[in-house]
Image (cartoon, helix red, strand yellow):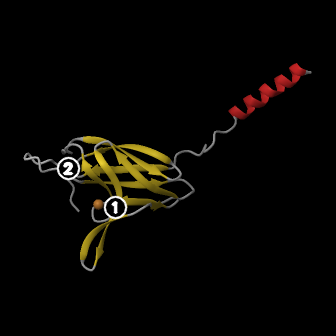
Amino acid sequence: MVLQALVWCIAAVVLVSCGPAPGAQAPAITITDAWARPAMMSGDGHGMGMNSAVYFVVRNSGGQADRLIGASTAVAGRAELHETREEGGVMRMVPVPAVEIPAGGEVAFRPGGLHIMLMDLKRDLKVGDSFELTLRFERAGELKLSVPVRQGGM
Ligand SMILES: [Cu+2]
């Protein structure tokens, strides 16, 4: 009787651990066209506090909206979500706490609009370099991508 109870117990444990994994839905967020602006420390040592910006397109092929809530990278002291806006004829950048990525939709981070601002760069970003950036989403979690450095206009 005790043995039978034990067998049932083991069976129950196996069943639970073999059940569908939490969040079994396939990842719905994809990032394309990522790039960053080059930034170079000046030779005279006055390049401290240098900035760059990262651009990309976020696509959400899932059935639920997600939100980009943060970013980080080893090449910068801080990485913030920014948006360039025109206010009274003046272009200015404002930090945004989160960016909604609608279900089945995409959001473009591009010059003159949304971008990831890299502040206090720890090294030069030369054309042809690349570095790893981590994007944090509310539902999809963390997503790492390799960002190439290139010249880009508007
Ligand atoms: Cu900015």
Identified by mark 1, the residue type is His
> Amino acid under label 2?
Pro
Mark 2 residue CB less than 8 A from any atom of ligand 1: no
Q: Position of residue 3 (x, y in %)?
A: 87, 19
Q: Position of residue 36 (x, y in %)?
A: 26, 50
Residue 37's tag is none
Q: Does 111 sit left or right of 1 as displayed?
A: left
> Ligand 1 lies in which image quarter?
bottom left
Q: Which residue is mark 2?
A: 38
| Callout 1: SS | strand
Image quarter hosting the N terminus:
top right
Number of numbered labels in the structure image: 2
* Mark 1 sits near ligand 1, with its Cβ under 8 Å away: yes
Nearer to us: label 1 or label 2:
1
Question: Residue 51's x, y, as percent?
Answer: 23, 54
**Residue at the extreme right of the image, as rendered:** 1
> What is the x, y in percent for residue 56?
34, 54
In-image side of 49 versus 67 (left or right): left
Image quadrant in which you'd find residue 97 = bottom left
User: Which residue is drawn at the image coordinates 29% and 41% (left, top)?
Assistant: 131
Most foreground residue, 116 or 30:
116
Q: Nearer the viewer, residue 84 or 48?
A: 48
Circle 2 packing at 10 Å, graded few (<14), some (14-19), many (20+), is many
Circle 1 sits on which residue? 82
Name which residue lies at 34% across and 61% down: 82
Residue at 44% in and 59% down: 106
Above or below for 86 versus 17 = below
Q: CA distance from mark 1 to mark 2?
A: 18 Å
Q: Residue furthest top?
A: 3
Q: Earlier in the sequence, mark 1 or mark 2?
A: 2
